[in-house]
Amino acid sequence: MMEGAGPAGYCTLDHDGCVTCSDAGIPVRVLSVRGDDALCEDSVGNRAQIAVELVAPVRSGEVLLTHGGVAIGKVAG
């Protein structure tokens, strides 16, 4: 497991992401949606506003793959 990684080695919002460009997609669960942004939570409870225009429409409960604060895909549930 990578240092700072969440459960099962997943990256989290507070660590292990890009930094131009280690290229890690971070899975997050949508908590709420407001316009083109969604409040999301990662596997260890970190929360962030994520831009969701590229994967709209988005609903609460869905899991998104994010990179650099932008949703780049939906994870099949």
Image: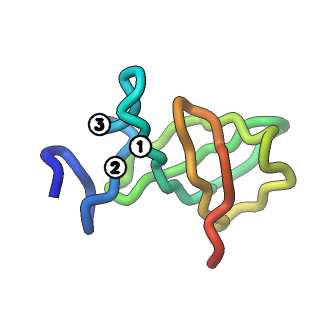
Q: Dot 1: what SS?
A: loop
Residue 44 on image: x %, y %: 32, 56
Nearest the viewer among 1 and 49 is 1
In the rendering, at what x and y percent does residue 24 appear? 41, 43
| Amino acid type indicated by mark 1 | Ala
Residue 15's mark? Answer: 3
Residue reaching furthest to the bottom: 77
Label 1: few (<14), some or many (≥20) within 10 Å? some
What amino acid type should be assigned to the residue bearing mark 3? His
Q: Are marks 2 and 3 in contact (CB under 8 Å)?
A: yes
Q: Nearer the viewer, residue 54 or 41?
A: 54
Q: Are marks 2 and 1 in contact (CB under 8 Å)?
A: yes
Corner quadrant of residue 61: bottom right
> Which residue is found at the position 62% from the left and 78% from the top?
77
Could you tell me how far apart the alpha carbons at marks 3 and 1 are, in whole angstroms?
10 Å
3 and 1 marks in contact (CB < 8 Å)? no
The image shows residue 31, relative to residue 4, as above or below, that is below
Location of residue 16 in the rendering, given as x and y in whole percent from the top left corner: 29, 38
- Residue 21 occupies which quadrant of the picture? top left
Tell me if mark 2 has few (under 14), some (14-19) or many (20+) residues whose alpha carbon lies within 10 angstroms of its own: many
User: Which residue is denoted by mark 2 in the rendering?
Assistant: 11
- Disc 2 vs disc 1: which is toward the camera? 1
* Image-based side of 8 in relation to 2, left or right: right
Q: Residue at x 62, y 66 (%)?
A: 75
* Observer-nearest of 59 and 9: 9
Asked if 35 appears above or below 7 in the picture, the reply is above
Q: Which residue, given by chain and number where applicable, does mark 1 sit on?
A: 24
Which numbered disc flags the more N-terminal residue, 3 or 1? Answer: 3
Looking at the image, residue 77 sits to the left or right of residue 16; the answer is right
**Residue displayed at 56% across by 59% down:** 29
